[in-house]
Amino acid sequence: MDTKVLAEDNPDWLAEATDIVRSGSVVALATETVYGLAGDATNPSAVARIYAAKGRPSKNPLIVHVSGVDMATALGHVNERALSLIGQHWPGPLTIVVPMKESSDLVPAVTAGRGSVALRQPRGALAKLIEHSKTALAAPSANASGHVSPTTAGHVLMDLQGEIPLIIDGGKTKFGVESTIVDLRHDTPAILRPGAISAEELGMEEHKPITNDAAPDAPGMLASHYAPKAAVRLNVLADDLKSGETHLGFGDACRPGALNLSPGGDMVEAATNLFGMLRSLDERGATAIAVAPIPSAGLGATINDRLARAAAPRS
Ligand code: TXA
Ligand code: MG
């Protein structure tokens, strides 16, 4: 299949993307976090196409993107605590996991049959598409399964060219890392995946460290994930590079001439650059990436989580 790319400032994009969604196919487009691969969450063939295009294992459920609280409450049991969190953070990079409503018309494959649903109201082109197509859209990050998430339309094209009919190019995404996923099924809310909203901002404890548990709470969160092609080694100062390694710097810890996640040591900037720089190093043919130490405050926890997964042994 040919993959068409339309700019988000092309006046036809929304009509074309809506036609594709209504026909049960899929479209990649920007959110404020990363690019998503969206399809109608109530249409079995759309959901099957999402899994097939990414090569995603069927046991890894998809986030359902909604236009607000009303659509969310039709799909999941949104309690007081959930309402207060979404009141503060929607639209935005917060995903909540809540018990699914039996009456919801979601395709079972979206939730991988778990009885819980992950819900988020995004910003950006994806938000416009939900409003216009009037349906909840299942949308994982628009990368090949296991790879780092795409923060530009070019990244999507690299991973999914020939697999999907349409990409809407909205430029580089704002946050550059995925949403924070909060599990609200129990008395104490828990962060399942650190993301673009820090634990401090949510007033919650850090997420549990990564595991390769057989039945993790967020099944996509296996240790080896978000990986570039190159091997990755962490906490490496510029003077400690081994031969053949390419440095990825942060702040003052940066080999001269190397890419730097944020020369000024700014966490928000580093998060925005993380996935794009890992991809650029792959493109430049780096076989081993050595990453400078990143402090773990604020978005540093999210950056270190993704780096730990990128560095984990691969299966
Ligand atoms: O920022 C984001 O969250 C992006 C944009 C496109 O919205 N989406 C994204 O989706 O990162 P994805 O599919 O790459 O990651 C979704 C994560 C996976 O780890 C998945 O296992 C978890 O959400 N998840 C989805 N539904 C779940 C559920 N019912 N219970 C627990 N975890 C769930
Ligand atoms: Mg993903």
Image: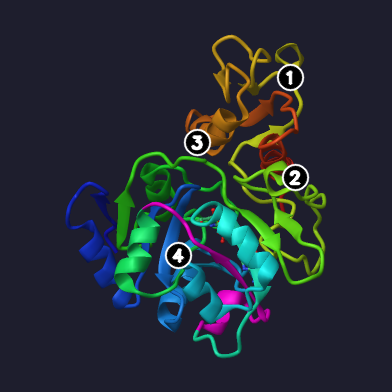
Label 4 beta carbon within 8 A of ligand 1? no
Of badges 3 and 2, nearer the viewer stands 3
Q: Which residue is drawn at 49% across and 86% down?
A: 105
Farthest-out residue, bottom: 103
Residue at the spot of label 1? 242
Under mark 2, the amino acid is: Ala
Is residue 111 magenta-colored?
A: yes
Give the percent coordinates (x, y) of residue 11.
Answer: 17, 53
Q: Are marks 3 and 1 in contact (CB under 8 Å)?
A: no
Chain-order first, disc 3 or disc 2: 3
Residue at the spot of label 3? 276
Q: Which of 242 and 299 is in front in this view?
A: 299
Q: Is mark 1 on a helix, strand or loop?
A: loop
Chain-order first, disc 4 or disc 1: 4
Q: Can residue 49 be seen in this view?
A: yes
Of badges 2 and 1, nearer the viewer stands 2
Looking at the image, is 74 positioned above or below residue 215? below
Q: What element carries label 2?
A: loop
Q: Does residue 133 appear to the left or right of 123 in the view shown?
A: left
Chain-order first, disc 4 or disc 2: 4
Extent of the magenta region: 106-124
The quadrant in which the N terminus is found is bottom left
